[in-house]
Image (cartoon, rainbow, N blue to C red):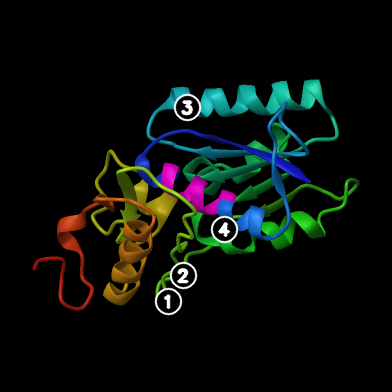
Amino acid sequence: MRFTIKTYGCQMNVYDSERIAEMLTAAGLESATDGLGDVLLLNTCSVREKPREKVISAIKQAKAGNPAIKVVVTGCVAQLEGDSLLAEGADLVMGPDWYDSLAETLFSMDATADYQAVYDGFITDNPTFLEADPRATGVSAFLPIQKGCGNFCTYCVVPMARGPERSRPQDDILHEVKRFVSKGATEIFLLGQNVNSYKGEGGISG
Protein backbone atom coordinates (compact mmCIF):
# COMPACT_ATOMS: atom_id res chain seq x y z
CA MET A 1 0.00 0.00 0.00
CA ARG A 2 1.02 3.58 -0.65
CA PHE A 3 0.00 6.41 1.68
CA THR A 4 -0.27 10.18 1.84
CA ILE A 5 -0.51 12.26 5.04
CA LYS A 6 -2.10 15.70 5.24
CA THR A 7 -1.56 17.58 8.49
CA TYR A 8 -3.76 20.27 10.00
CA GLY A 9 -3.08 22.33 13.11
CA CYS A 10 -0.29 22.56 15.66
CA GLN A 11 3.33 21.45 15.92
CA MET A 12 2.19 18.44 17.94
CA ASN A 13 0.29 17.23 14.90
CA VAL A 14 3.32 17.86 12.68
CA TYR A 15 5.41 15.71 15.02
CA ASP A 16 2.75 12.98 15.15
CA SER A 17 2.47 12.92 11.35
CA GLU A 18 6.23 12.45 11.02
CA ARG A 19 6.18 9.60 13.51
CA ILE A 20 3.17 7.98 11.81
CA ALA A 21 4.97 8.15 8.46
CA GLU A 22 8.01 6.45 10.00
CA MET A 23 5.86 3.68 11.50
CA LEU A 24 3.95 3.05 8.27
CA THR A 25 7.19 2.95 6.27
CA ALA A 26 8.74 0.52 8.76
CA ALA A 27 5.65 -1.68 8.39
CA GLY A 28 6.14 -1.91 4.63
CA LEU A 29 3.92 0.87 3.27
CA GLU A 30 5.33 3.37 0.79
CA SER A 31 4.88 7.12 0.71
CA ALA A 32 2.97 8.08 -2.44
CA THR A 33 4.90 10.35 -4.77
CA ASP A 34 2.08 10.75 -7.27
CA GLY A 35 -1.57 11.15 -6.33
CA LEU A 36 -2.93 10.08 -2.94
CA GLY A 37 -2.01 6.40 -3.11
CA ASP A 38 -4.10 3.70 -1.43
CA VAL A 39 -4.40 5.38 1.98
CA LEU A 40 -5.06 9.05 2.74
CA LEU A 41 -4.40 9.98 6.35
CA LEU A 42 -5.80 13.28 7.62
CA ASN A 43 -4.23 14.37 10.92
CA THR A 44 -6.67 16.89 12.31
CA CYS A 45 -7.03 19.87 14.63
CA SER A 46 -10.23 20.94 16.40
CA VAL A 47 -9.23 24.37 17.71
CA ARG A 48 -11.06 26.15 14.92
CA GLU A 49 -14.01 25.24 12.72
CA LYS A 50 -12.22 25.85 9.41
CA PRO A 51 -9.74 22.93 9.72
CA ARG A 52 -12.67 20.61 10.45
CA GLU A 53 -14.44 21.81 7.30
CA LYS A 54 -11.24 21.19 5.30
CA VAL A 55 -11.12 17.63 6.62
CA ILE A 56 -14.72 16.92 5.59
CA SER A 57 -14.00 18.37 2.15
CA ALA A 58 -10.81 16.29 1.82
CA ILE A 59 -12.71 13.09 2.67
CA LYS A 60 -15.35 13.75 0.03
CA GLN A 61 -12.85 14.77 -2.65
CA ALA A 62 -10.70 11.70 -2.05
CA LYS A 63 -13.68 9.34 -2.25
CA ALA A 64 -15.02 11.06 -5.35
CA GLY A 65 -11.66 10.65 -7.07
CA ASN A 66 -11.10 7.06 -5.94
CA PRO A 67 -13.94 5.22 -4.16
CA ALA A 68 -11.52 2.42 -3.17
CA ILE A 69 -9.14 4.69 -1.26
CA LYS A 70 -8.96 4.19 2.50
CA VAL A 71 -9.41 7.49 4.32
CA VAL A 72 -8.02 7.54 7.85
CA VAL A 73 -8.72 10.46 10.18
CA THR A 74 -6.49 10.95 13.22
CA GLY A 75 -5.93 13.77 15.70
CA CYS A 76 -8.28 15.84 17.82
CA VAL A 77 -11.28 15.92 15.47
CA ALA A 78 -11.05 12.13 15.25
CA GLN A 79 -11.21 11.87 19.03
CA LEU A 80 -14.09 14.30 19.42
CA GLU A 81 -16.24 13.57 16.38
CA GLY A 82 -15.49 10.00 15.37
CA ASP A 83 -19.04 8.95 14.53
CA SER A 84 -19.73 12.01 12.38
CA LEU A 85 -16.49 11.50 10.44
CA LEU A 86 -17.43 7.90 9.71
CA ALA A 87 -20.80 9.15 8.48
CA GLU A 88 -18.97 11.55 6.15
CA GLY A 89 -17.07 8.68 4.52
CA ALA A 90 -13.95 8.05 6.62
CA ASP A 91 -12.95 4.38 6.76
CA LEU A 92 -10.98 4.53 9.99
CA VAL A 93 -11.01 7.06 12.83
CA MET A 94 -8.20 6.91 15.38
CA GLY A 95 -7.58 9.12 18.40
CA PRO A 96 -4.10 10.34 19.48
CA ASP A 97 -3.43 7.54 21.98
CA TRP A 98 -3.81 4.75 19.45
CA TYR A 99 -1.31 5.53 16.69
CA ASP A 100 1.03 2.68 17.56
CA SER A 101 -1.64 0.25 16.31
CA LEU A 102 -2.37 2.12 13.07
CA ALA A 103 -0.31 -0.02 10.68
CA GLU A 104 -1.67 -3.27 12.10
CA THR A 105 -5.23 -1.94 11.86
CA LEU A 106 -4.75 -0.88 8.23
CA PHE A 107 -3.48 -4.33 7.24
CA SER A 108 -6.45 -5.97 8.97
CA MET A 109 -9.06 -3.85 7.22
CA ASP A 110 -10.96 -5.48 4.40
CA ALA A 111 -12.25 -3.43 1.50
CA THR A 112 -15.79 -4.59 2.23
CA ALA A 113 -15.59 -4.23 6.02
CA ASP A 114 -17.82 -1.93 8.00
CA TYR A 115 -16.46 1.41 9.06
CA GLN A 116 -14.13 1.24 12.02
CA ALA A 117 -13.41 3.60 14.90
CA VAL A 118 -10.72 3.47 17.55
CA TYR A 119 -11.06 6.58 19.61
CA ASP A 120 -12.37 5.67 23.06
CA GLY A 121 -10.57 6.20 26.34
CA PHE A 122 -7.17 7.44 27.39
CA ILE A 123 -4.15 5.74 28.89
CA THR A 124 -3.50 7.63 32.11
CA ASP A 125 -1.18 5.43 34.15
CA ASN A 126 1.18 4.48 31.32
CA PRO A 127 1.33 7.40 28.88
CA THR A 128 2.23 6.53 25.31
CA PHE A 129 4.45 8.73 23.14
CA LEU A 130 5.57 8.04 19.61
CA GLU A 131 9.34 7.68 19.52
CA ALA A 132 11.17 9.32 16.67
CA ASP A 133 13.36 7.37 14.30
CA PRO A 134 14.66 10.27 12.24
CA ARG A 135 16.63 9.41 9.14
CA ALA A 136 17.56 13.02 8.58
CA THR A 137 16.46 16.31 10.03
CA GLY A 138 17.05 20.01 9.64
CA VAL A 139 18.45 22.41 12.18
CA SER A 140 15.23 22.36 14.23
CA ALA A 141 13.15 19.49 15.61
CA PHE A 142 9.94 19.18 17.64
CA LEU A 143 9.85 16.96 20.73
CA PRO A 144 6.73 16.40 22.89
CA ILE A 145 7.42 16.17 26.63
CA GLN A 146 3.81 15.93 27.72
CA LYS A 147 0.34 15.44 26.27
CA GLY A 148 -3.13 16.45 27.35
CA CYS A 149 -4.13 19.04 29.93
CA GLY A 150 -5.69 19.07 33.39
CA ASN A 151 -6.99 22.64 33.46
CA PHE A 152 -10.41 22.11 31.80
CA CYS A 153 -10.84 25.74 30.75
CA THR A 154 -14.36 26.47 29.54
CA TYR A 155 -13.17 27.64 26.11
CA CYS A 156 -10.78 24.74 25.38
CA VAL A 157 -11.35 21.18 24.13
CA VAL A 158 -7.83 19.85 24.71
CA PRO A 159 -8.66 17.72 27.81
CA MET A 160 -11.42 16.00 25.82
CA ALA A 161 -9.37 15.66 22.63
CA ARG A 162 -5.93 14.85 24.08
CA GLY A 163 -6.86 13.46 27.49
CA PRO A 164 -5.62 14.40 30.96
CA GLU A 165 -2.15 15.83 31.42
CA ARG A 166 0.59 13.21 31.24
CA SER A 167 4.34 13.84 31.35
CA ARG A 168 6.88 11.89 29.35
CA PRO A 169 9.67 10.12 31.27
CA GLN A 170 12.86 12.18 31.31
CA ASP A 171 15.04 9.30 30.08
CA ASP A 172 12.82 8.94 27.00
CA ILE A 173 13.09 12.66 26.29
CA LEU A 174 16.90 12.64 26.54
CA HIS A 175 17.09 9.51 24.36
CA GLU A 176 15.07 11.18 21.63
CA VAL A 177 17.05 14.42 21.88
CA LYS A 178 20.22 12.43 21.22
CA ARG A 179 18.64 10.77 18.18
CA PHE A 180 17.67 14.14 16.70
CA VAL A 181 21.11 15.61 17.42
CA SER A 182 22.76 12.63 15.74
CA LYS A 183 20.83 13.50 12.57
CA GLY A 184 21.88 17.14 12.56
CA ALA A 185 19.43 18.99 14.82
CA THR A 186 20.92 21.84 16.85
CA GLU A 187 17.63 23.32 18.08
CA ILE A 188 14.98 21.29 19.93
CA PHE A 189 11.50 22.69 20.59
CA LEU A 190 9.79 21.06 23.59
CA LEU A 191 6.07 20.58 22.95
CA GLY A 192 3.12 20.27 25.30
CA GLN A 193 -0.12 21.97 26.20
CA ASN A 194 1.64 23.51 29.22
CA VAL A 195 5.33 22.60 29.28
CA ASN A 196 5.86 24.59 32.50
CA SER A 197 3.76 22.02 34.33
CA TYR A 198 5.97 19.09 33.28
CA LYS A 199 5.94 16.61 36.17
CA GLY A 200 8.60 14.10 35.15
CA GLU A 201 11.39 13.26 37.55
CA GLY A 202 13.97 16.05 37.65
CA GLY A 203 11.77 18.58 35.86
CA ILE A 204 13.01 20.30 32.70
CA SER A 205 15.49 22.76 34.20
CA GLY A 206 19.26 22.31 34.20
Q: Tag 2, which secondary structure?
A: loop
Q: Pointer 3 and pointer 2: residues touching (CB < 8 Å)?
A: no
Indicate the amino acid at tag 4: Tyr
Q: Residue at x 84, y 29 (%)?
A: 67
Mark 4 or mark 3: which comes first in sequence?
3
Magenta residue span:
14-21
- Which label is found at residue 51? 3
Image position, residue 104 (x, y; %): 72, 62
Left or right? Give the position of 108 relative to 59: right
The answer to whether residue 163 is magenta is no
> Circle 2 is placed at which residue position?
123
Q: Nearer the viewer, residue 8 or 32?
A: 32
Question: Label 4 to label 3, Cα distance in Å?
Answer: 21 Å
Alpha-carbon span between mark 2 and mark 1:
6 Å
User: Does residue 105 appear in the picture of this structure?
Assistant: yes
Q: Mark 2: which amino acid? A: Ile
Identify residue for label 4. 99
Q: Nearer the viewer, residue 15 or 178?
A: 178
The disc at residue 126 is 1
Q: Is residue 97 above or below residue 48?
A: below
Considering only order in the chain, which callout, 4 or 2, is on the residue closer to the N terminus? 4
Q: Secondary structure at mark 4?
A: helix
Secondary element at image label 3: helix
